[in-house]
Amino acid sequence: MKTTLLGGTLALLLIAFGAFANGPAQADDPPLYDRLGGLPAISLAVSEFVDDFIQDPLIMANPAVAEQKTAVAAPYIKFQVTALVCELSGGPCQYTGKDMREAHDGLDVTAEEWDRMVEIFVATLDSLEVPEAEKQELLDLLGPTRDDIVMAGG
Ligand code: HEM
């Protein structure tokens, strides 16, 4: 029973990683959501990203962020970020969380913290072997949120 469960989990992970390892994107490709491997792959990437993010010394040196982005809150943040990325990449989700300005209001996120967040995000996508084209498209989706998130001298 335990072995079957483990086998099933491994198979699921392999499917998720396999989807990430597809070739370069073409103009007539399916939506980014599908090329990434849908919700199984996106939720895996978001989960790993958030785990690394909330343990990063530079990010956590911001006291307001450290206070809000606790381990307890992580599953909720993962859910909301997954829904957002799903929707933005053309998937069948509807993001129902706070808008980006409201969610990050009062956190005094700096330009340096934003850059570190991008580094962590890229490292996560690289570790999952997301191809360059899809990685760039994801970064292009997140880029416009910067103005609503970076409040401190950014
Ligand atoms: C350095 C950059 C960032 C920092 C320090 C940061 C920090 C935080 C913190 C502390 C919260 C919890 C706020 C609370 O519960 O009061 C939060 C919520 C959230 N963040 Fe970020 N964040 C960053 C970038 C981003 C980016 C790039 C996205 C996606 C485009 C994002 C999406 C979200 C979402 C969806 C929530 C939940 C909103 C809700 O509660 O409904 N964040 N963030």
Image (tube, rainbow, N blue to C red):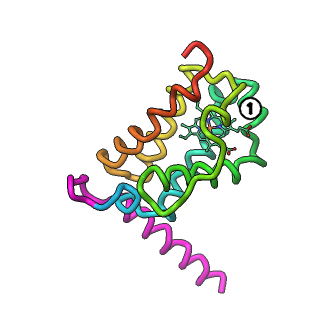
Pick the front one: 143 or 134? 143
Q: Hey, which quadrant is residue 140 in on the image?
A: top left
Q: Position of residue 87 (x, y in %)?
A: 49, 54
Q: Hey, which quadrant is residue 132 in on the image?
A: top left
Q: Start and end of the magenta stretch?
A: 1-29
- 66 vs 11, left or right, is right
How crowded is the residue under tag 1: few (<14 C-alpha within 10 Å), some, or many (20+)? some
Q: Residue at x 54, y 78 (%)?
A: 7
Q: Amino acid at mark 1?
A: Ala
The residue under label 1 is 66
Residue 136 sits above or below residue 66 on the image: below
- Helix, strand or loop at label 1? It is helix
- 31 vs 83, left or right, is left
- 65 vs 110, left or right, is right
Q: Residue at x 36, y 55 (%)?
A: 32
Ligand number 1: quarter of image: top right
Pick the front one: 90 or 40? 90
Q: Residue at x 45, y 63 (%)?
A: 38
51 within the magenta span:
no
Residue 63 sits above or below residue 73 on the image: above
Q: Position of residue 130 (x, y in %)?
A: 37, 51
Q: Position of residue 42 (x, y in %)?
A: 49, 57
Quarter of the image with the N terminus in it: bottom right
Q: Residue at x 75, y 46 (%)?
A: 71
